[in-house]
Image (cartoon, rainbow, N blue to C red):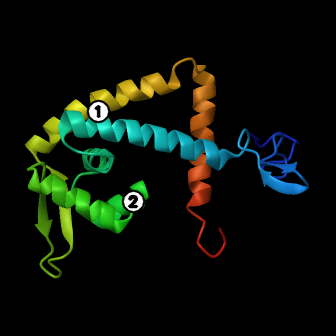
Amino acid sequence: MEDSTSTSPICPEGRISKPTKTRDGRLIINISSYIPFYLLVLNNALSRGSSQYYIDTFGIGIVEWRVISMLAIEPRIPASTICQILSLDKASTSRALKRLHDLGHLDFEASKADTRRKIWWLNAKGYELHDRLIVVALKRESKLIKGIDPEDLETLLKVMRIMKDNIDHFSYKNA
């Protein structure tokens, strides 16, 4: 990472490891240094393991947990805010909200101007489930970061925040 006093170029031009390699004269992805590969593998492994455990233990999946977590962080928000912050699609978010409401974990208030627009929040039963789920989520995070130097972890968080900001400027036209 570059700071304001560094003279080395910033990524991608100053990158040390390369995201590609050549095999049989053809440029291919080098998965040992291609960042989206690691993000994908980590996300898939974490989501798959979490979702199955959450379904078996709590009766909800990973998308529902993400919605519960978001509503604990920021109560009384519309589905569109959940979609935007968590980068979830509208259909998944809508299904999760409906399921959580049907299970008695959420309450909502419909807009008088547009009854399709609802403001959602966790009720007491929802917070009780949240409080049980967060313990599991934090244990899983602890296992994930086991053996990482605390300074390296802070650097990783800094880098991920920068990548998050960068991805916020992507579009399907300039991906």
In the displayed structure, would residue 118 be above or below residue 40? below
Q: Position of residue 32 (x, y in %)?
A: 72, 38
**Residue type at the position of mark 1:** Ile
Q: Is residue 9 left or right of residue 142?
A: right
**Mark 1 Cα-neighbour bin, 10 Å: few <14, some 14–19, many ≥20:** some
Q: Quadrant of residue 81?
A: bottom left
Return the x and y of residue 51 as percentages of the image width and height: 33, 41
Residue 134 image label:
1
- Counting residues from the N terminus, which is met first, the one under dot 1 or under dot 2? 2
Q: Which residue shows up at 14% across the image and 77% down it?
A: 115
Q: Quadrant of residue 91?
A: bottom left
Q: Is residue 106 above or below residue 144?
A: below
* Disc 2 element: loop
Residue kind at label 2, given as amino acid type:
Leu
Residue 88, label in figure: 2
SS type, badge 1: helix
Q: Is residue 103 visible?
A: yes
Q: Position of residue 152 (x, y in %)?
A: 63, 26
Is residue 77 among what the camera can see? no
Judge by depth and name the residue closer to the eye, 71 or 30: 30
Residue density around tag 2, few if under 14, some if 14–19, many if 20 or more, within 10 Å: some
Q: If the image is split into quadrants, where does the N terminus sit?
A: top right
